[in-house]
Amino acid sequence: MASTSPGAQKPSTTTKRSTTSRKPAGAGTRTSRATSTSRTASRTSTTIVERAVLVPVGAGLLARDNLVSTVKGLAGKYRTRTGLERELKRYERRGVTARDRFENQVRRGRMRFEREVRQRRSLVEKTVSQNRQRLDRELISVRRDFEKQSGAVSARVERLVTNAQGLIGS
């Protein structure tokens, strides 16, 4: 029973541990960290290299697929004379539509511009007419005032002349 007791087993486990060579606790964790860091770095560099090769290859294949589908589409459309004529008519209709749309935009722009010019011209003419009427009223008012003032001045001068002649004659 002594061999099955926990106290009896302790010396045997202690001897096993002492026979194996172990590194200190701190050294083991440093080594595992360094190893995992180098593994991660090598995986990262491998991934970057793979991506650097695979991205252009994928882009080239995609461009090739697009080109092939475009050529097949064009070959299908223009294979026969009727297909070619149909496409030409389609392009012509599209051109006519674009031309008409452009002409309408130009026409609308010209009409808008002419409307603004007419509005501004009528506003300027109205303002000039109002200013001319105001100026005429002011001129008439100034002329009346001037006539009144000149009449008063001439009457005063006549009085002064008469008084002066009376003083000279006496």
Image (cartoon, grey):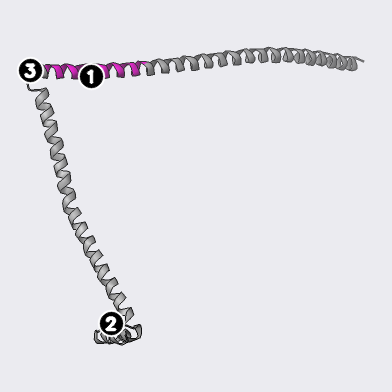
> Going by the image, does 151 lie left or right of 87?
right
Of the residues under marks 2 and 1, which one precedes in the sequence?
Answer: 2
x and y, in percent, of residue 36 in the image = 26, 68
User: Between residues 69 and 126, which one lies in front from this camera angle?
Assistant: 69
Residue designated by label 2:
23
Q: Residue at x 17, y 48 (%)?
A: 56
C-alpha span from label 2 to label 1: 83 Å
Q: Amino acid at mark 3?
A: Arg
Name, please, the residue furthest toward the right. Answer: 170
Quarter holding the N terminus? bottom left
Q: Label 1 amino acid?
A: Arg
Q: Which mark is residue 81?
A: 3
Sooner in the amino-acid sequence: mark 2 or mark 3:
2
Task: Give the image location of residue 16, x and y in percent.
Answer: 26, 84
Residue drawn 34% across and 19% down?
Answer: 105
The residue at the point 14 percent across, 48 percent down is 57
Q: Mark 1 and 3 residues: CB-CB less than 8 Å, in contact? A: no
Residue 96 is one of the magenta-drawn residues = yes
**CB within 8 Å, label 2 to label 1:** no
Q: Which residue is mark 1?
A: 94
- The percent coordinates of residue 127 (x first, y second) are 57, 16
Which three-letter amino acid code belongs to the residue tagged 2?
Answer: Lys
- Is 91 placed above or below 66 here? above
Q: Position of residue 9 (x, y in %)?
A: 31, 84
In magenta, the rendered stretch is 84-107
